[in-house]
Image: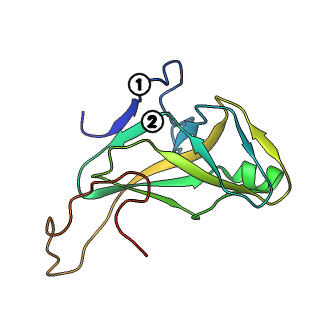
Amino acid sequence: MIRGFEILEGYEGIHLPTRKTAFSAGYDLEAAENVLVSREKISLVPTGLKAFFPADEVLLIYLRSSLAVKHGLILANGVGVIDADYRGHIILPVVSFFGDFEIPRGMRIAQGLFQKYMTVDGDNLGVGAIRSGRFGSTGEF
């Protein structure tokens, strides 16, 4: 298999992401733990998952629109970008604008879309630092 999700050790009993209809673009990701999202503070919501896919793809993570409209939740970074060389836990930084909101374990909170991407001519693919960190680990400000 060249593309998919794996459940991390310690998160047994959660579901692998699936598409809910034949025409759904995204795979639904669930919260792996109960998390209280407080007003205007970033809360980290673990998915209990890691992903694997080809080097010329990216996994984009979007919060489910119903959570934004009904509960005032957003991803703190707008869209999560998971690079092909990231092998760590997919954790979502969530903010609430309406007030405290409890995300229960198992709630579908985001969608992941695998997409191809292009690079510029002359790009030195594979040249540069090797990822050594975890969440947000490709460099400093």
Q: Which amino acid type is shown beneath numbered disc 2?
A: Leu
Q: Nearer the viewer, mark 2 or mark 1?
A: 1
Query: Could you say where residue 82 lies in the image, as x and y percent from the top left?
Result: 40, 54
Q: Is residue 33 visible?
A: yes
Query: Could you say where residue 30 lies in the image, as x and y percent from the top left?
Result: 59, 35
Query: Could you say where residue 49 lies in the image, as x and y percent from the top left?
Result: 45, 35
Q: Quadrant of the N terminus?
A: top left
Q: Which amino acid type is shown beneath numbered disc 1?
A: Glu
Q: Write down the residue under mark 2.
A: 49
Say above or below: 14 vs 103.
above
Q: Quadrant of the C terminus?
A: bottom left
Report the front residue among 122 and 22. Answer: 122
Say above or below: 33 vs 119.
above
How many other residues sit within 10 Å of disc 1, few (<14), some (14-19) or many (≥20)?
A: few
Report the front residue among 81 and 132. Answer: 132
Q: CA distance from mark 2 to mark 1?
A: 9 Å
What residue is rendered at 72% in x and 58% in y?
41
What residue is rendered at 29% in x and 45% in y?
53
Q: Is residue 25 visible?
A: no
Residue 117 circle label: none
Report the front residue among 89 and 5. Answer: 89
Instruction: Name the secondary structure under disc 2.
Output: strand
Residue 127: image quadrant is bottom left
Query: Could you say where residue 133 lies in the image, as x and y percent from the top left?
Result: 33, 53
Residue 9 circle label: 1
Say above or below: 41 vs 13.
below
89 on left or right of 56: right
Instruction: Name the secondary structure under disc 1.
Output: loop
Name, please, the residue furthest toward the right: 99
| Residues at discs 2 and 1 in contact (Cβ within 8 Å) | no
Report the front residue among 68 and 138. Answer: 138
How many other residues sit within 10 Å of disc 2, few (<14), some (14-19) or many (≥20)?
A: many
